Amino acid sequence: MSRPPAYLHKVTENEFGFPSGHAQVSTGFYGYLGLQSKRTKIIIVGTIAIFLISLSRIYLGVHYTGDVVGGIIFGLMVAFISYKSESGILNIINRQGRLTKYLIAMCLPVILVLMASLQGSLLKEQIELGLVMGSSGFGYLLEEEKIRFFRCKK
């Protein structure tokens, strides 16, 4: 869906308007973090961040309210599905060796980007999404291996 008219934009945006990617990503991230940690302070800070990020998209004139609400709904779905499916996915991944885990984290986004490119011309956004997915996978594995944020004592 298209964005509001360009004369309302306070920043330059040229891509589609629905759903708001900023609202979706912030809701997915902070929603998952809140579900995983179950800490009241994190949930409150995350809720405030989601609200302010979403409000900023409307204020900047680059999204309609429905775009932001749609982004929040999609973000909540991603957070919930990620939270619920994480243990099953981790069981499969944890049975693999260290090298295999990192190869999966690298190859899966490449395969998805290649599949998307078969649908037509490869867009810059598809490449960026593949890089984000790959780096997120590597980051997740490194966090599990070295940092273990969610396993720390409260």
Image (cartoon, rainbow, N blue to C red):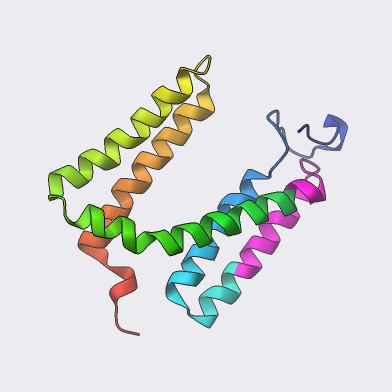
Residue at image point 40% right, 59% down: 85
Residue at image point 42% right, 34% down: 130
Q: Relative to 7, does residue 51 appear above or below in the rendering?
A: below
Q: Quadrant of the C terminus?
A: bottom left
Residue farthest along the bottom direction in this orientation:
154
Question: Which x, y percent locates residue 69?
Answer: 74, 54
Q: Quadrant of the N terminus?
A: top right
Taking the image as shown, residue 102 lies to the left or right of residue 39, namely left
Residue at image point 21% right, 44% down: 102
Taking the image as shown, residue 42 lies to the left or right of residue 60, namely left
Dividing the picture into quadrants, the one containing residue 73 is bottom right
Question: Which x, y percent locates residue 87?
Answer: 33, 63
Dividing the picture into quadrants, the one containing residue 113 is top left
Question: Which x, y percent locates residue 135?
Answer: 35, 43
Residue 58 shown in magenta: yes
Provide the residue span drawn in magenta.
47-67
Residue 29 seen in this snapshot: no
Taking the image as shown, residue 76 lies to the left or right of residue 101, namely right
Dividing the picture into quadrants, the one containing residue 99 is top left
Residue 40 shown in magenta: no
Q: Relative to 108, does residue 55 appear above or below in the rendering?
A: below
Q: Nearer the viewer, residue 139 or 88?
A: 88
